[in-house]
Image (cartoon, helix red, strand yellow):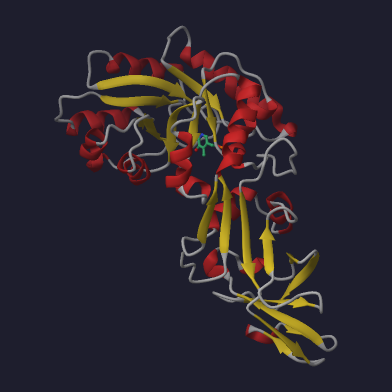
Amino acid sequence: MTHYRDTYACIRLDYIQDNVETLYQKVHKPFMAIIKANAYGHGYQQVANVLKDNPHISMFGVATLKEAIDLRNIGIQQDILVLGAIPIEDLDLVIRYDITLSLFSKDYMDEIQRLYHHHQPVKVHIKIDTGMNRIGIKSKKEFEDILSHCQNSIFQVDGVFTHFATADDPLQKEAYHRQIEMFYDVIGNHTFRYIHCQNSAAMMYHHDERSNLGRIGIAMYGIDPSGEECDELKQVMSLYTRVAMIKKVKKGERIGYGHTYTALEDEYIATLPIGYADGLIRANQGRQVYIAGHYYPIVGRICMDQMMVKVDENVHLHDRVEIFGEHISLARMAKELSTIPYEIVCLVSERVERIYQK
Ligand SMILES: *Cc1c(COP(=O)(O)O)cnc(C)c1O
């Protein structure tokens, strides 16, 4: 197999299955597997292919209509919910590919109704906004209004759902409880095939018996939603490269664009074939990578396709370099970058080859 370049993400598909099982043991309910954004950067095709036969996965959730159609085109047969807004002009595709919509306002409903000219019903889950203030309806009155319009109409209501803003934060438990109470208050005595509200954090840190489907996202990829280290889950993605060149520079020589690093003594500098176009953003300058049992600092600015690391005699040409993985967790990296692990894995660009391990 041709690799073109010594930079790759290793994806442990077996860990995905293990993480699904771990979550299942907590909540004992079926899941909607969230595989938006190319399965959080892990590669939607391979991830969907292992999940489609997992007995705990009842359906899939994505962010865009394109992502939903891509799943149909690789043969996914389960229901696919698009969590975000779909342009009304694309309604034909929604029907053709049997995609489920999020119905998030009366206006949106009216627009769909106006344009609709098919025989099949439009499958929807009604989105209730209980505190995110993103999409969704905000009152029981609107909910009842939409429900009554759904009767004997083109809409087939398969579910109702909401999304938490603070389920990952132990200091904001009250906000979580306000949201979940409002959710069940709005639903009232109505029954639905799917009632869902739990994201990964809600399943890991809270209990809820009333919903019958969990939306499993970040935890499936082995990352604790709180951004903390986690023993229970297995991190699915690791990012590696290899040393392309090592050179000795003299004390006082400068490294990279802008000459932002000056060698403090005679030093070994290794060049790695990975840069910000691979998703390793420039803010990583000064952080460390792991090579042959030791940590080494990234020196100089990260270039688009390459970067430099200050090493020593222990490091050899073609040695494997861990950017994140077993020795550098995504939790640690995210903290050092003042971000969240979600962002780091989503940014690993298409150019980085994914190597899958079953
Ligand atoms: C992305 C998303 C999820 C998954 O959240 P995680 O924190 O990754 O578990 C669940 N529900 C909605 C509406 C989402 O947009």
Where the C terminus falls, by quadrant?
top right
Residue at image position (43%, 9%) is 190
Vertical arrangement, residue 214 with respect to residue 345, above or below: above
Q: Position of residue 34 (x, y in %)?
A: 49, 37
Residue at image position (59%, 48%) is 342
Vertical arrangement, residue 219 with respect to residue 330, above or below: above
Residue at image position (42%, 42%) is 63
Residue 14 horizontal side relative to residue 254, left or right: left
Q: Position of residue 136 (x, y in %)?
A: 44, 30
Q: Position of residue 141 (x, y in %)?
A: 41, 16
Vertical arrangement, residue 287 with respect to residue 92, above or below: below
Quadrant of the rendered structure where residue 19 is? top right
Residue at image position (54%, 57%) is 347
Counting every numbered tag in the picture gives: 0
Quadrant of the rendered structure where residue 307 is? bottom right
Residue 167 horizontal side relative to residue 357, left or right: right
Q: Compare residues 308 and 4 and report the one nearer the observer.
A: 4
Residue farthest to the top? Answer: 189
Q: Is residue 165 visible?
A: no
Residue farthest to the front? Answer: 1
Quadrant of the rendered structure where residue 261 is? bottom right
Q: Position of residue 127 (x, y in %)?
A: 43, 27
Q: Is residue 81 visible?
A: yes
Residue 314 horizontal side relative to residue 259, left or right: right
